[in-house]
Amino acid sequence: MNGVNISFDNSQTYINIALQPSEFDNEVNIKDVYARLDEGECKGLYISEASLKSAVDTANHFFKTNDGTVVQERIGERRNAEVEFRISEDSMKATLIITTPYGGKLPNLKSIKALAVKNNIHRGLSVKRIVSMLEQARVAPPGALVDDVVAKGLPPRNGRSSRFIPLVPNALDRILRPQSNDGQRVDMRNLGEVICIKANTPVLRRTEPSKGRSGFDVRGGKLQPSPGEWVEFKMGSGTAVSDDDANVLVSVIAGMPKYKDQIMNVDDTFTCNGVNVGSGHVNYDGAVLVNGDVTEKMQIKAAGDVTVNGFVESAYIESGGDIIITEGAMGKVNDNSSDYTCKLVAAGSIHVQHGQGIDVQCSGSITVGRQLAYSRLRCGGGVTVGQLDKPMGNLFACEIISQNKVEAGTLGAVSGSTLKIDFSQGFNLLLERKDSLDELLRQLRENNLKHKEKIDIIRNKRVPEELRSKVNDALELFNNESALLEWLELKAVEVKNAKEAYQTDIKLVANKRLYSGVSAKLNNRNWRSEREYDRAKVFYDAHQWVYEPIV
């Protein structure tokens, strides 16, 4: 291009352009100038688009008007990288921003660390991240932005409040994880001394709250934690604070310990060697421990746990806690399967080693050691047949109403006997609760909106002094109503989440085999196995039952 001269100044930093209109063959195209700048020593340097356009437009105007005035302009420069630190408002993190150089130099690690100190960043600086950013900047195009968080503070860890550690196991926990004798055989009978404790036995320990760990921000400021709090004992029956240690609860009576909801109770325990015609029925306001069998037509009613270290045959057992039968339970069923001679009713959970022909009803879960058949089960939890870590027991020919998963080694039998599992009851209870809450919320929202409009009107008016107390009462009522509405909104979300979790939790799991005749139900959604399957699970997803093999 004639009449276009591009050069550096003496420091080789700035780019100058000289345009001589008298030497132009025609008007200068700015694209041609850019193409020339993009080669040789000017390549990769910063070019000011505004300055270049202004110079070219002026020179082209002089060319058209036959004005030979030379146009000179500084249009670019060699720029070093720009480095900037930005610290968040809470001073818990600092971001490094590097604008890559236009033919200039990148800073080194030492200079960036010095700049960080200059910007009052004293702690939490990551050398590894800075090195990584410098490597990115070396290969990035000129003028690119490379940014990342290079310094982080450490938030304080608040102290943990005191916790409660049971010093004796619940009877049900002991049964589900029995101890072996001599490291080989498991003796399910030898539980009396473990389940029943003597007076003045330590049963619950309270740990000391921790002070927490201090933190810091990137400026080096120290952040103090909130220490944990002492949590008071929730005193249960049959317990007292130890005279020797204020952080230990001891039993004041000999009995059966039960730890639930951070409350340790020691129930006065009735112990006998069997329940039969010789001993008579047992009705006790505490726990019952039977070191023997419960024979036909006998009854046990207890306010606490009932533990039978033996066999139960065609008996009735009712418990205000858990029912634990270390051997088995068996009963007879009439022809139409409506009346069972062996019935177990518990407010807590129920464990049976094996069972047949029994009617089981509890608010908690049902666990079976080996096998359960020809029985009726209703529970507020799930049903597990076999060891808890991997159930491999057998479950067949039963009618089950459950509110959680049903898991066993084998579901159903080769004969094709029916195994019916209905998950509808718990789901419908959640639906009823959700519908009631939604209706209550709808009415409360409408009322709260009307009241808010009236309160806003009152606030915008001048209230006479004699009516001010009544206005304050109305404001207090409105605030209480708003607080109630907010609380109900949270409860509605909890119920909605519980409904979704229920559908996720219910399932059938067969760890060995799933035979035909097994059915699952959730209201009008049904699934039934028509053939024999290997290891499999059946779960509820997207409003339908889904079968999936276990690989």
Image (cartoon, rainbow, N blue to C red):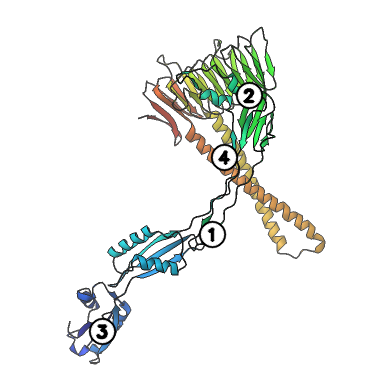
Q: Which of label 2 and label 3 is nearer to you? A: 2
Instruction: Name the image quarter holding residue 473.
Output: bottom right
- Label number found at residue 31: none
Q: Quick one: 232 or 370, which is closer to the camera?
A: 232
User: How crowded is the residue under tag 4: few (<14 C-alpha within 10 Å), some, or many (20+)?
Assistant: some
- Label number found at residue 495: 4
Upstream in the sequence, badge 1 or badge 3? 3
- Label number found at residue 222: 1
The secondary structure type at the circle numbered 1 is strand
Upstream in the sequence, badge 4 or badge 3? 3
Give the amino acid at mark 1: Lys
- Label number found at residue 197: 2
The residue tagged 3 is: 10
User: How crowded is the residue under tag 1: few (<14 C-alpha within 10 Å), some, or many (20+)?
Assistant: some
Q: Quick one: 219 or 56, which is closer to the camera?
A: 219
Residue 368 position within the rendered picture, expressed as x and y whole percent measured from the top left: 50, 21
497 sits left or right of 29 in the view: right
Upstream in the sequence, badge 4 or badge 2? 2
Q: Is residue 261 visible?
A: no
